[in-house]
Image (cartoon, rainbow, N blue to C red):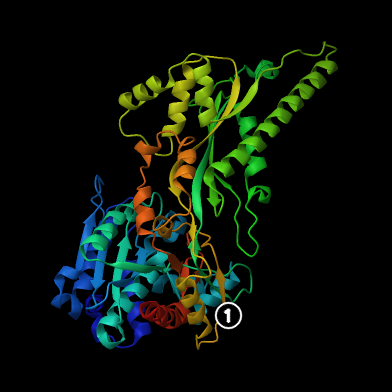
Amino acid sequence: MNSVFNLETVTNEEQRIELLTRELVATKSVNGTKGEVDLVEKLEKILRSFTVFKEHPQWVWTQKIDGDLLGRKNIFAFLGKEGTHKTVLYHSHFDTVGLDDFGSIKEKALDPDYLEQYFTNYDSDREIQNDASSGDWLFGRGALDMKSGDAVNIANLLYFSEHPKLQKGNLLFMGNCVEENDHSGVIAALDELKRLQEEWHLQYSVAINTDFISPKYAGDTQKYIYYGAAGKTLTCFYIKGIETHVGNTYAGIDSTLIASRINVLINNNPAFVEDIPGEEILPSSCLMLRDQKDFYNVQTAKVTEMYFNTFTYKKPVFEIIEQLKEAVKLDCEQLVVETRQRENKFLSKLNFPAGDNSPELNVYSFEEYLKHLAELGIDYQKLINNFISDNGELDKRSAGFKLIDYLDQQINDNEAKVILFLAPPFCPHNSITKDSKVYQNLEETLDENDAHIDFTMKQFFPYLSDSSYLMMDESPQEVEKMKNIFPLADQLYPLPYDKMRELNIPAVDIGVYGKGAHTWKERVYKPYSFVILPKLIRNYTQKIWKN
């Protein structure tokens, strides 16, 4: 599809964006693969084909991610306006999740035409069959999340280069790699944004993200616009039971039973979400639960590990973790009582006397656990240093579990315990006040739209977003309290908190619209995403420049 590299010859905007989306979808850029490098190279070629960037080649450049073994890069394109420092940032990511969910048609996951025909004949899902038959939807991995968003941003960059009289300020396009797991692309980009701020004297007015939006329920026709980003933390539980032979099962406490109780207590439980009227506040969900037995035997599992995706909105992370810890503590106390009741019921059937076994099951935060070690006379800091020096490259998700297991082996006690801690990634939450120009200009833009679209403004983008790293609401003191329960935070996930606060770029999400993100049924709705959305973003951009 060589014509995509000469987008300026395509005068119809809808066709231009669809053509570009198709070209980007056709290049596999699964997170954690060399495909992310392939795509950034393609993006650079596309951008450099524009007349404005042939005249100003220094306005397109890439940024390598330091220490990245794959050689992944971010990409930037600048459209300057003489006499102003006011800058609007268009940003989006270009990596995708994997292709395995496509099953037997995995080899066609990047072929929108094949998938449209396939789903036209797909009787198992009437909704997707109707969508495919309409011709209004573009299918394929990344079509919705978020290569169509990349295409909209690039098309708008090209539009303003072709209509210089409409451009009243600077535009900066930023395409990021590594969004789908650790967000290391945008984290690295903070250095570049800061450099541009200092060397080019850019004043960042707003960051516009085009990450996807979707209907919230069957028949929902609203289009959601977000003026802020939810945060996220990985809430982890190291669970140590008291192992025993299955022929004497009441002599111990099974770590998998404790983990099951915690999962039932926390997973999708709305009792542990923040109360923010009108906002879509999501509960924690379990992303991993496994015992640590590596072969079969008839011993109950001594250690089980689990972690949850926990969204944050307004509360600081340490408060949320404290609330979860107290709830788990109460539930574990109840579990001990119920376990003894079950044992006594079992013993009574055999006419045996009631048991007097009362094992301890304690619940700690990581900070409390370190204090417990200190009370036992253990130099935990020396042990932590030894752990770091004895271990090379550690997996970000497993490192905390391995450290705690290493520390606990030094005690060699007979205490069942639950230790709650955090692991990467940590996404800060942020939002924009309604009295700001950023919000007011957005509200005016939506009110003035001539497409008769039912827009609904929400404070927090409900999915995970690179926008989380452009500003943050939590104070330095709140962050330090969070890091106290985040083992090896500075080694595993060193975030430039000061830089995020200094940049302080308010971010909004005005996203492409579609269904089925992160599933094999992923599809973007073309009439809105390729026709209405680009104009909406341009109108908002012009308002920002004027105010």
**Residue 308 falls in image quadrant:** top right
- Residue at position x 58%, y 20% in the image: 299
Where residue 67 appears, as percent x and y from the top left, is 24, 44
Q: Is residue 300 left or right of residue 43?
A: right
Query: Against 355, is 516 above or below?
Result: below
**Looking at the figure, which quarter contains the N terminus?**
bottom left
Seen as rendered, the residue at the extreme top is 353
| 425 w.r.t. 210: above or below | above
Q: Is residue 253 visible?
A: no
Q: Nearer the viewer, residue 175 or 217?
A: 175
Query: x, y percentage for residue 455?
Result: 55, 77
The number of callouts visible is 1
Q: Quadrant of the C terminus?
A: bottom left
Q: At label 1, which amino acid type do we have? A: Asp
Name the residue tied to disc 1: 454
Using the rendered view, name the quadrant where residue 86 is placed: bottom left
Q: Residues within 10 Å of mark 1 (few under 14, many from 20)?
A: few
Picture coordinates of residue 45 (x, y %)?
20, 69
Q: Secondary structure at mark 1?
A: loop
- Residue 371 drawn at (x, y percent): 52, 23
Q: Nearer the viewer, residue 288 or 491?
A: 491
